[in-house]
Image (cartoon, helix red, strand yellow):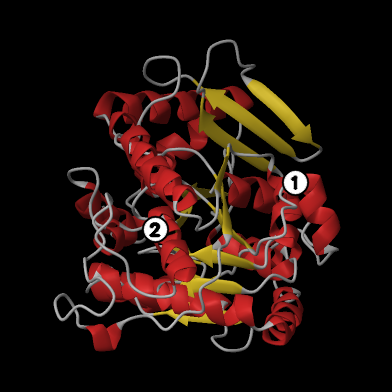
């Protein structure tokens, strides 16, 4: 989401629109305002206790109120109000609708994730999201899939849902030499390389990638793991049955996992992943390289180094990792959910695996291993997929995304915006929901 906001705001500024980004000050001593480049300024707003906060703490009423008040005060200091608000994520949507009601200006909202899709992680979040849906003049979604989910799960008016696909910075993310990239990344050990990049949490499924590598190395099904994948030893009659066993060629692979723990149980989750990784290496199945988060532009080296990028998420609003990997000419094996279903053309730019969240996770791991095996074992297929993926990714640019968002902003911009005092005196009910 941070990549999305920065890239889109930068592109909007370069198109001639002034962008003021308001974010919570996550540490003490930050300047109140940081000029990123002409037309783009980031405002650090003090809200709640100093320092980073978990998402549940960020949703605390006092933090939200502090942030809302801080943004309004900063707008007041500027002496004029924005033409339109653009909220990213449900917490920003909560603040956005309050400012909209206070100042009487238009509101665009992008949720990025939805509680009724991923599973509600903060009490009351889904109800608040429904309120934001009602109060937003337009809801901006990255894919048609999310637009349909908003209509089905939140009753969103389809006429107020607009698709703006994110982009990719092709100056950084483009095809390159794999061997050179592996040497640069320190991953040149001769074994096939699978890449996972993202937050280390169950929703993203990095442990499933490790399980899939165990199957790849063994060539058949393995017993239950510490992470809870269903038990069905090779040739056994129990579990899902021997007839459902994965038919993978036995080949040890390495897995590069780029990212850090996320959420309250993130640290324990990563410990479990390291147990899986140690067992994989002990049995000669390959090695898992745990790599801390890297600067965004440096991810391109890892994308180019990989034979295949795996995205085993249970839920994915868009899937920027899949798009960036594709732009680097790397085939993608991903779960057939959300935006991944639109980014990855199954059989052409990569392979899609049925969603394992609603069924047997063991079956999902088998399918994941089979898909990875298909790409890794067939160099000609992988080459064709990589070329097709890079070609398709060319259509996604931040410049195009900014142009579409700018047009939507103009559509809902308040007319005759003047001083803050004038607006406060004439502000009426929310134009979207009537409140």
- Front in this rendered view, residue 164 or 349: 349
In the rendered image, is residue 238 in sight? yes
Report, in whole angstroms, how far the alpha carbon at label 2 lies from the one at label 1: 44 Å
For numbered disc 2, what is the local secondary structure?
Answer: loop
Q: Residues within 10 Å of mark 2 (few under 14, many from 20)?
A: many
- Front in this rendered view, residue 56 or 364: 364
Residue beneath the point at 43% across and 35% down: 424
In the rendered image, is residue 155 in sight? no
Residue beneath the point at 45% across and 56% down: 109
Q: Within the image, what quadrant is residue 81 found in?
A: top right
Q: Is residue 110 left or right of residue 170?
A: left
Q: Is residue 153 left or right of residue 171?
A: left
Q: Is residue 305 left or right of residue 197?
A: right
Judge whether 363 appears above or below 38 on screen. Answer: below
- The numbered mark, 2 or 1, whose residue comes first in the sequence reads 2
For discs 2 and 1, the disc positioned in front in the rendered view:
1
Judge whether 432 appears above or below 68 on screen. Answer: below
Residue 96 horizontal/vertical position (percent) = 42, 44
- Front in this rendered view, residue 284 or 435: 284
Judge whether 252 appears above or below 234 on screen. Answer: above
Q: Residues within 10 Å of mark 1 (few under 14, many from 20)?
A: some
Residue 153 horizontal/vertical position (percent) = 24, 70
Residue beneath the point at 44% across and 23% down: 52
Residue beneath disc 1: 185
- In contact (CB < 8 Å): disc 2 and disc 1: no
Judge whether 12 appears above or below 152 on screen. Answer: above
Q: Within the image, what quadrant is residue 313 found in?
A: bottom left
Residue 175 horizontal/vertical position (percent) = 81, 67
Residue 181 horizontal/vertical position (percent) = 80, 54
Q: Is residue 5 left or right of residue 371?
A: right
Residue beneath disc 2: 136
Residue beneath the point at 73% across and 86% down: 380
């Amino acid at each position: 989401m941070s990549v999305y906001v920065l890239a889109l705001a930068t592109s909007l500024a370069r198109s001639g629109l002034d962008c003021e980004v308001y974010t919570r000050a996550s540490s003490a001593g930050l300047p109140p305002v940081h000029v990123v480049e002409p037309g783009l300024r980031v405002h650090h707003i003090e809200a709640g206790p100093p320092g980073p906060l978990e998402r549940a703490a960020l949703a605390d009423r006092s933090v939200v109120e502090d942030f809302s008040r801080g943004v309004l005060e900063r707008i007041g200091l500027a002496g004029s109000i924005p033409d339109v608000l653009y909220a990213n994520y449900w917490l920003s949507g909560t603040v956005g609708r309050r400012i909209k009601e206070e100042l009487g200006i238009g509101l665009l909202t992008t949720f990025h994730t939805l509680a009724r899709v991923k599973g509600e992680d903060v009490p009351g979040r889904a109800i608040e999201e429904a309120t934001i849906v009602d109060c937003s003049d337009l809801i901006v979604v990255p894919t048609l899939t999310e637009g349909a989910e908003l209509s089905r799960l939140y009753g969103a008016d389809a006429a107020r849902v607009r698709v703006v696909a994110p982009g990719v910075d092709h100056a950084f993310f483009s095809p390159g030499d794999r061997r050179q990239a592996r040497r640069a990344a320190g991953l040149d050990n001769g074994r096939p390389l699978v890449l996972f990049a993202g937050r280390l949490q169950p929703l993203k499924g990095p442990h499933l990638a490790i399980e899939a590598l165990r199957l790849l190395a063994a060539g058949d099904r393995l017993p239950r793991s510490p992470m809870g994948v269903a038990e069905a030893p090779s040739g056994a009659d129990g579990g899902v049955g021997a007839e459902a066993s994965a038919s993978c060629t036995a080949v040890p692979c390495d897995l590069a996992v780029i990212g850090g723990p996320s959420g309250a149980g993130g640290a324990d989750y990563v410990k479990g992943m390291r147990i899986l990784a140690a067992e994989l290496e002990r049995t000669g199945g390959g090695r898992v390289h745990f790599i801390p988060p890297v600067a965004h532009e440096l991810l391109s080296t890892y994308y180019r180094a990989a034979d295949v990028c795996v995205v085993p998420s249970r839920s994915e609003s868009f899937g920027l990792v899949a798009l960036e990997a594709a732009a680097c000419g790397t085939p993608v094996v991903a779960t057939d959910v959300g935006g991944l279903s639109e980014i990855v053309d199954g059989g052409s730019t990569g392979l899609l695996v049925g969603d394992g969240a609603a069924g047997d996770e063991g079956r999902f791991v088998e399918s994941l291993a089979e898909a990875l095996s298909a790409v890794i074992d067939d160099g000609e297929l992988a080459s064709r997929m990589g070329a097709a993926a890079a070609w398709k990714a060319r259509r996604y640019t931040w410049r195009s995304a900014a142009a579409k968002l700018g047009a939507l902003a103009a559509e809902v911009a308040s007319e005759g915006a003047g001083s803050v005092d004038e607006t406060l005196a004439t502000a009426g009910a929310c134009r979207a929901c009537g409140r």
